[in-house]
Image (tube, rainbow, N blue to C red):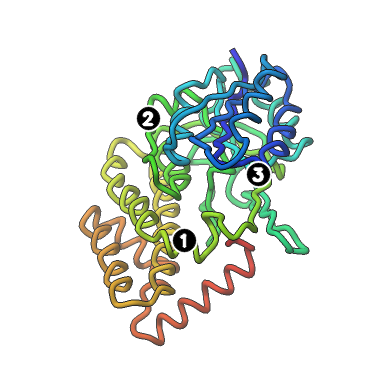
Amino acid sequence: MKLLTITVPCYNSEAYMRHCLDTLLTGGEDVEILIVNDGSTKDNTAAIADEYAEKYPSVCRAIHQENKGHGGAVNTGIANASGIYFKVVDSDDWVDLDAYKKILDTLRQLTGEENGIDCLFSNYVYEKEGAKKKRAMRYTGSFPQERVFGWNDMKPLKLGKYVLMHSIIYRTELLREVGLQLPEHTFYVDNLYAYIPFIRVKKMYYLNVNFYRYYIGREDQSVNEEVMKSRIDQQIRVNNIMIDYVKNWKSGLVPKQKTYMRHDLSIIMAVTSILLIRIGTKESLRMKKDLWKRLKKADLPTYIMVRQGFLGQAMNLPGRGGRKVSKMGYAAAQKMFGFN
Protein backbone atom coordinates (compact mmCIF):
# COMPACT_ATOMS: atom_id res chain seq x y z
CA MET A 1 0.00 0.00 0.00
CA LYS A 2 1.25 3.48 -0.87
CA LEU A 3 1.58 6.17 1.77
CA LEU A 4 0.09 8.99 -0.31
CA THR A 5 -2.03 9.09 -3.44
CA ILE A 6 -1.84 12.34 -5.40
CA THR A 7 -4.51 12.85 -8.03
CA VAL A 8 -3.69 15.27 -10.86
CA PRO A 9 -6.80 16.26 -12.88
CA CYS A 10 -5.68 17.12 -16.41
CA TYR A 11 -7.73 18.77 -19.13
CA ASN A 12 -5.79 20.03 -22.14
CA SER A 13 -2.84 20.50 -19.79
CA GLU A 14 0.05 19.87 -22.18
CA ALA A 15 1.63 23.29 -21.59
CA TYR A 16 2.25 22.87 -17.86
CA MET A 17 1.54 19.33 -16.59
CA ARG A 18 5.14 18.12 -16.93
CA HIS A 19 6.36 20.66 -14.38
CA CYS A 20 3.65 19.59 -11.96
CA LEU A 21 4.39 15.88 -12.37
CA ASP A 22 8.16 16.32 -12.14
CA THR A 23 7.85 17.97 -8.73
CA LEU A 24 5.52 15.20 -7.52
CA LEU A 25 7.88 12.44 -8.68
CA THR A 26 10.46 13.55 -6.11
CA GLY A 27 8.27 11.86 -3.48
CA GLY A 28 9.59 8.49 -4.65
CA GLU A 29 8.05 5.08 -4.10
CA ASP A 30 5.90 6.14 -1.14
CA VAL A 31 3.73 8.10 -3.55
CA GLU A 32 1.13 7.05 -6.09
CA ILE A 33 0.41 9.65 -8.79
CA LEU A 34 -2.91 9.23 -10.58
CA ILE A 35 -2.88 11.30 -13.78
CA VAL A 36 -6.56 11.67 -14.69
CA ASN A 37 -6.93 12.72 -18.31
CA ASP A 38 -10.41 14.22 -18.22
CA GLY A 39 -11.38 13.90 -21.87
CA SER A 40 -8.65 16.16 -23.30
CA THR A 41 -9.05 16.67 -27.04
CA LYS A 42 -7.02 19.74 -28.05
CA ASP A 43 -3.46 18.71 -27.23
CA ASN A 44 -1.16 15.87 -26.14
CA THR A 45 -2.34 15.54 -22.54
CA ALA A 46 -3.31 11.89 -23.00
CA ALA A 47 0.04 11.02 -24.59
CA ILE A 48 1.99 12.76 -21.82
CA ALA A 49 -0.02 10.90 -19.18
CA ASP A 50 0.81 7.59 -20.88
CA GLU A 51 4.46 8.62 -21.22
CA TYR A 52 4.82 9.17 -17.46
CA ALA A 53 2.94 5.96 -16.65
CA GLU A 54 5.26 3.99 -18.93
CA LYS A 55 8.43 5.68 -17.67
CA TYR A 56 7.52 5.47 -13.96
CA PRO A 57 5.22 2.42 -13.74
CA SER A 58 5.63 1.93 -9.98
CA VAL A 59 4.59 5.52 -9.22
CA CYS A 60 2.44 6.92 -12.04
CA ARG A 61 -0.81 5.63 -13.41
CA ALA A 62 -2.69 7.17 -16.32
CA ILE A 63 -6.49 7.09 -16.18
CA HIS A 64 -8.40 8.22 -19.27
CA GLN A 65 -12.07 9.13 -19.02
CA GLU A 66 -14.70 11.11 -20.89
CA ASN A 67 -14.90 14.71 -19.78
CA LYS A 68 -16.54 15.03 -16.37
CA GLY A 69 -15.01 18.26 -15.12
CA HIS A 70 -12.71 18.83 -12.16
CA GLY A 71 -15.09 17.20 -9.69
CA GLY A 72 -15.42 14.10 -11.84
CA ALA A 73 -11.64 13.80 -12.07
CA VAL A 74 -11.29 14.06 -8.28
CA ASN A 75 -14.03 11.44 -7.83
CA THR A 76 -12.09 9.11 -10.13
CA GLY A 77 -8.96 9.69 -8.08
CA ILE A 78 -10.72 8.83 -4.81
CA ALA A 79 -12.23 5.68 -6.35
CA ASN A 80 -8.85 4.45 -7.62
CA ALA A 81 -6.56 5.57 -4.79
CA SER A 82 -4.48 2.93 -3.00
CA GLY A 83 -2.68 5.36 -0.69
CA ILE A 84 -3.42 5.75 3.00
CA TYR A 85 -3.70 9.49 2.47
CA PHE A 86 -5.07 11.50 -0.45
CA LYS A 87 -4.09 14.79 -2.06
CA VAL A 88 -5.26 16.73 -5.12
CA VAL A 89 -2.73 18.79 -7.08
CA ASP A 90 -4.03 20.66 -10.11
CA SER A 91 -1.98 20.25 -13.28
CA ASP A 92 -0.96 23.92 -13.49
CA ASP A 93 0.29 23.96 -9.90
CA TRP A 94 3.30 22.34 -8.25
CA VAL A 95 4.80 21.56 -4.84
CA ASP A 96 7.85 22.73 -2.92
CA LEU A 97 10.37 19.89 -2.70
CA ASP A 98 11.69 20.51 0.83
CA ALA A 99 8.18 20.86 2.23
CA TYR A 100 7.12 17.72 0.32
CA LYS A 101 9.85 15.69 2.02
CA LYS A 102 8.83 16.92 5.45
CA ILE A 103 5.18 16.10 4.79
CA LEU A 104 5.99 12.56 3.66
CA ASP A 105 8.26 12.04 6.68
CA THR A 106 5.46 13.21 8.96
CA LEU A 107 2.80 11.00 7.34
CA ARG A 108 5.17 8.04 7.52
CA GLN A 109 5.76 8.66 11.20
CA LEU A 110 2.05 8.97 12.00
CA THR A 111 0.87 6.00 9.93
CA GLY A 112 0.01 2.98 12.01
CA GLU A 113 0.35 4.83 15.27
CA GLU A 114 -2.51 5.10 17.72
CA ASN A 115 -2.57 8.84 17.13
CA GLY A 116 -3.07 8.57 13.36
CA ILE A 117 -4.76 11.52 11.70
CA ASP A 118 -7.77 12.27 9.52
CA CYS A 119 -6.32 15.40 7.95
CA LEU A 120 -2.97 17.16 7.58
CA PHE A 121 -2.84 20.90 6.89
CA SER A 122 0.02 22.80 5.30
CA ASN A 123 0.43 26.25 3.77
CA TYR A 124 -0.12 27.26 0.17
CA VAL A 125 1.45 30.13 -1.76
CA TYR A 126 -0.27 32.33 -4.33
CA GLU A 127 2.07 32.12 -7.33
CA LYS A 128 0.46 35.08 -9.05
CA GLU A 129 1.89 35.95 -12.45
CA GLY A 130 3.76 39.27 -12.31
CA ALA A 131 3.55 39.63 -8.52
CA LYS A 132 6.86 40.60 -6.93
CA LYS A 133 5.88 39.25 -3.53
CA LYS A 134 4.29 35.84 -3.21
CA ARG A 135 1.67 35.62 -0.50
CA ALA A 136 1.46 32.51 1.66
CA MET A 137 -1.68 31.36 3.44
CA ARG A 138 -0.56 30.18 6.89
CA TYR A 139 -2.54 28.95 9.89
CA THR A 140 -0.04 29.58 12.70
CA GLY A 141 -2.50 31.61 14.76
CA SER A 142 -5.24 28.99 14.64
CA PHE A 143 -3.77 25.48 14.51
CA PRO A 144 -1.29 23.89 16.95
CA GLN A 145 1.93 23.03 15.15
CA GLU A 146 3.57 19.65 14.66
CA ARG A 147 1.35 17.64 16.98
CA VAL A 148 -1.91 15.77 16.66
CA PHE A 149 -4.80 17.97 17.75
CA GLY A 150 -8.58 17.98 17.88
CA TRP A 151 -11.26 20.63 17.42
CA ASN A 152 -11.06 21.84 21.02
CA ASP A 153 -7.35 22.63 20.55
CA MET A 154 -8.02 25.04 17.67
CA LYS A 155 -8.46 28.78 17.74
CA PRO A 156 -10.86 30.46 15.29
CA LEU A 157 -9.57 31.17 11.80
CA LYS A 158 -8.94 34.85 11.28
CA LEU A 159 -10.94 36.99 8.89
CA GLY A 160 -9.90 36.30 5.31
CA LYS A 161 -8.23 32.99 6.15
CA TYR A 162 -9.81 29.72 5.21
CA VAL A 163 -8.80 26.23 4.27
CA LEU A 164 -8.67 25.49 0.54
CA MET A 165 -8.20 22.19 -1.24
CA HIS A 166 -4.55 23.20 -1.59
CA SER A 167 -4.10 23.13 2.20
CA ILE A 168 -5.41 19.62 2.79
CA ILE A 169 -4.28 16.03 2.80
CA TYR A 170 -7.10 13.69 3.90
CA ARG A 171 -7.10 10.12 5.08
CA THR A 172 -8.40 8.31 2.00
CA GLU A 173 -10.87 6.12 3.84
CA LEU A 174 -12.43 9.16 5.49
CA LEU A 175 -13.36 10.51 2.04
CA ARG A 176 -14.98 7.19 1.25
CA GLU A 177 -16.73 6.97 4.61
CA VAL A 178 -18.27 10.41 4.15
CA GLY A 179 -19.36 9.39 0.62
CA LEU A 180 -17.79 12.41 -1.04
CA GLN A 181 -19.02 12.72 -4.62
CA LEU A 182 -18.32 16.08 -6.19
CA PRO A 183 -20.69 17.40 -8.88
CA GLU A 184 -19.53 16.74 -12.42
CA HIS A 185 -19.24 19.42 -15.11
CA THR A 186 -19.18 22.08 -12.41
CA PHE A 187 -16.48 24.57 -11.51
CA TYR A 188 -15.57 25.62 -7.95
CA VAL A 189 -16.23 22.19 -6.44
CA ASP A 190 -12.92 22.51 -4.57
CA ASN A 191 -14.97 24.50 -2.05
CA LEU A 192 -17.02 21.38 -1.36
CA TYR A 193 -13.86 19.28 -1.06
CA ALA A 194 -12.64 21.59 1.72
CA TYR A 195 -16.01 21.59 3.49
CA ILE A 196 -18.07 18.39 3.34
CA PRO A 197 -15.51 15.92 4.79
CA PHE A 198 -14.95 18.01 7.91
CA ILE A 199 -18.07 16.69 9.61
CA ARG A 200 -16.09 13.42 10.01
CA VAL A 201 -12.64 14.86 10.79
CA LYS A 202 -11.51 14.43 14.41
CA LYS A 203 -7.72 14.20 14.49
CA MET A 204 -5.63 16.79 12.66
CA TYR A 205 -2.01 17.86 12.20
CA TYR A 206 -0.50 21.11 10.96
CA LEU A 207 2.92 21.59 9.36
CA ASN A 208 3.94 25.22 8.91
CA VAL A 209 5.58 24.64 5.53
CA ASN A 210 4.82 26.33 2.19
CA PHE A 211 4.01 23.11 0.37
CA TYR A 212 1.50 23.90 -2.39
CA ARG A 213 2.26 26.46 -5.07
CA TYR A 214 -1.02 27.79 -6.43
CA TYR A 215 -0.55 29.37 -9.85
CA ILE A 216 -2.74 32.35 -10.79
CA GLY A 217 -2.33 34.16 -14.07
CA ARG A 218 -3.98 32.50 -17.07
CA GLU A 219 -6.85 34.48 -18.59
CA ASP A 220 -8.93 31.34 -19.00
CA GLN A 221 -8.32 30.18 -15.42
CA SER A 222 -11.48 29.41 -13.46
CA VAL A 223 -10.53 31.84 -10.67
CA ASN A 224 -10.09 34.77 -13.05
CA GLU A 225 -12.76 37.23 -11.93
CA GLU A 226 -14.31 37.73 -15.37
CA VAL A 227 -14.48 33.95 -15.82
CA MET A 228 -16.08 33.61 -12.37
CA LYS A 229 -18.74 36.18 -13.25
CA SER A 230 -19.49 34.36 -16.50
CA ARG A 231 -19.93 31.13 -14.52
CA ILE A 232 -21.89 32.62 -11.65
CA ASP A 233 -24.55 29.92 -12.03
CA GLN A 234 -21.96 27.29 -11.06
CA GLN A 235 -20.67 29.33 -8.12
CA ILE A 236 -24.25 29.61 -6.88
CA ARG A 237 -24.80 25.88 -7.38
CA VAL A 238 -21.80 25.05 -5.20
CA ASN A 239 -22.82 27.64 -2.61
CA ASN A 240 -26.34 26.18 -2.46
CA ILE A 241 -24.95 22.68 -1.92
CA MET A 242 -22.96 24.05 1.00
CA ILE A 243 -26.07 25.70 2.42
CA ASP A 244 -28.16 22.55 2.06
CA TYR A 245 -25.42 20.53 3.79
CA VAL A 246 -25.97 22.44 7.03
CA LYS A 247 -28.57 19.87 8.07
CA ASN A 248 -25.77 17.30 8.38
CA TRP A 249 -24.15 19.35 11.14
CA LYS A 250 -26.72 18.25 13.67
CA SER A 251 -25.12 14.81 14.05
CA GLY A 252 -22.70 15.27 16.93
CA LEU A 253 -20.49 18.15 15.85
CA VAL A 254 -18.58 19.81 18.67
CA PRO A 255 -18.99 23.61 18.96
CA LYS A 256 -15.58 24.52 17.48
CA GLN A 257 -16.18 22.13 14.59
CA LYS A 258 -19.44 23.91 13.85
CA THR A 259 -17.64 27.26 14.12
CA TYR A 260 -15.15 26.10 11.51
CA MET A 261 -17.94 24.99 9.16
CA ARG A 262 -19.77 28.30 9.57
CA HIS A 263 -16.56 30.23 8.93
CA ASP A 264 -15.99 28.33 5.69
CA LEU A 265 -19.59 28.89 4.62
CA SER A 266 -19.36 32.61 5.40
CA ILE A 267 -16.32 32.97 3.11
CA ILE A 268 -18.10 31.33 0.17
CA MET A 269 -21.29 33.30 0.84
CA ALA A 270 -19.17 36.47 0.66
CA VAL A 271 -17.43 35.39 -2.56
CA THR A 272 -20.73 34.61 -4.28
CA SER A 273 -22.32 37.80 -2.98
CA ILE A 274 -19.53 40.12 -4.14
CA LEU A 275 -19.53 38.54 -7.60
CA LEU A 276 -23.27 39.15 -7.86
CA ILE A 277 -22.78 42.73 -6.64
CA ARG A 278 -20.04 43.33 -9.19
CA ILE A 279 -22.23 41.96 -11.98
CA GLY A 280 -24.65 44.61 -10.82
CA THR A 281 -27.84 43.75 -12.71
CA LYS A 282 -31.32 43.61 -11.18
CA GLU A 283 -31.29 39.87 -11.77
CA SER A 284 -27.93 39.35 -10.05
CA LEU A 285 -29.01 41.39 -7.03
CA ARG A 286 -32.19 39.33 -6.81
CA MET A 287 -30.08 36.16 -6.93
CA LYS A 288 -27.97 37.45 -4.04
CA LYS A 289 -31.09 38.11 -2.01
CA ASP A 290 -32.38 34.61 -2.77
CA LEU A 291 -29.06 33.09 -1.69
CA TRP A 292 -29.28 34.59 1.77
CA LYS A 293 -32.98 33.66 2.03
CA ARG A 294 -32.01 30.06 1.30
CA LEU A 295 -29.51 30.05 4.16
CA LYS A 296 -32.09 31.55 6.51
CA LYS A 297 -34.57 28.84 5.61
CA ALA A 298 -31.99 26.06 5.90
CA ASP A 299 -30.84 26.89 9.44
CA LEU A 300 -31.76 30.06 11.29
CA PRO A 301 -28.94 29.98 13.91
CA THR A 302 -26.33 29.56 11.17
CA TYR A 303 -27.93 32.33 9.14
CA ILE A 304 -27.85 34.70 12.11
CA MET A 305 -24.19 34.00 12.89
CA VAL A 306 -23.06 34.25 9.27
CA ARG A 307 -25.26 37.26 8.46
CA GLN A 308 -24.20 39.18 11.57
CA GLY A 309 -20.52 38.41 11.07
CA PHE A 310 -18.22 40.98 9.48
CA LEU A 311 -18.38 39.46 5.99
CA GLY A 312 -22.14 38.96 6.15
CA GLN A 313 -22.67 42.58 7.09
CA ALA A 314 -20.18 43.81 4.49
CA MET A 315 -21.98 41.95 1.71
CA ASN A 316 -25.43 43.23 2.69
CA LEU A 317 -24.93 46.96 3.11
CA PRO A 318 -28.05 48.78 1.88
CA GLY A 319 -28.42 50.63 -1.41
CA ARG A 320 -25.99 51.68 -4.10
CA GLY A 321 -23.72 53.32 -1.55
CA GLY A 322 -23.52 50.11 0.44
CA ARG A 323 -22.69 48.09 -2.65
CA LYS A 324 -19.96 50.58 -3.53
CA VAL A 325 -18.41 50.10 -0.08
CA SER A 326 -18.61 46.31 -0.53
CA LYS A 327 -16.75 46.58 -3.83
CA MET A 328 -14.05 48.75 -2.25
CA GLY A 329 -13.57 46.24 0.55
CA TYR A 330 -13.27 43.41 -1.93
CA ALA A 331 -10.67 45.32 -3.95
CA ALA A 332 -8.62 45.92 -0.79
CA ALA A 333 -8.76 42.23 0.15
CA GLN A 334 -7.83 41.26 -3.39
CA LYS A 335 -4.75 43.45 -3.22
CA MET A 336 -3.79 42.22 0.23
CA PHE A 337 -4.10 38.48 -0.39
CA GLY A 338 -3.29 38.33 -4.10
CA PHE A 339 -6.17 36.08 -5.21
CA ASN A 340 -7.83 36.27 -8.68
| Residue position marked by numbered label 1 in the rendering | 228
Q: Nearer the viewer, mark 3 or mark 2?
A: 3
| Residue position marked by numbered label 3 in the rendering | 93
Secondary structure of the residue carrying tag 2 is loop
Q: Nearer the viewer, mark 1 or mark 2?
A: 1
How far, Cα to Cα, is label 3 from label 2?
27 Å
Place of residue 88 in the rendered image (x, y in percent of width and height, measured from the top left): 56, 36
Quick one: 56 or 266, which is closer to the camera?
56
Residue 178, which numbered label? 2
Quarter occupied by the C terminus:
bottom right
How far, Cα to Cα, is label 1 from label 3?
19 Å
Question: Label 1 is placed on what type of residue?
Answer: Met
Question: Label 2 is placed on what type of residue?
Answer: Val
Nearest to N terminus: mark 1 or mark 3: 3
Secondary structure of the residue carrying tag 3 is loop
Q: Is residue 164 above or below residue 325?
A: above
Residue at 32%, 68% in the rendered image? 288
Quick one: 293 or 128, which is closer to the camera?
128
Quick one: 243 or 25, which is closer to the camera?
25
Nearest to N terminus: mark 1 or mark 2: 2
Residue 44, which numbered label? none
Quadrant of the rendered structure where residue 49 is?
top right
10 Å crowding of disc 1: few (<14), some (14-19), many (20+): some
Nearest to N terminus: mark 3 or mark 2: 3
Question: Label 3 is placed on what type of residue?
Answer: Asp
Residue at 38%, 86% in the rendered image? 320
In screen coordinates, is 297 left or right of 31? Answer: left
Place of residue 269 in the rendered image (x, y in percent of width and height, measured from the top left): 39, 60
How far, Cα to Cα, is label 1 from label 2?
29 Å
Q: Is residue 144 above or below residue 226?
A: above
Residue sitting at the far bottom: 321
Quarter occupied by the N terminus:
top right
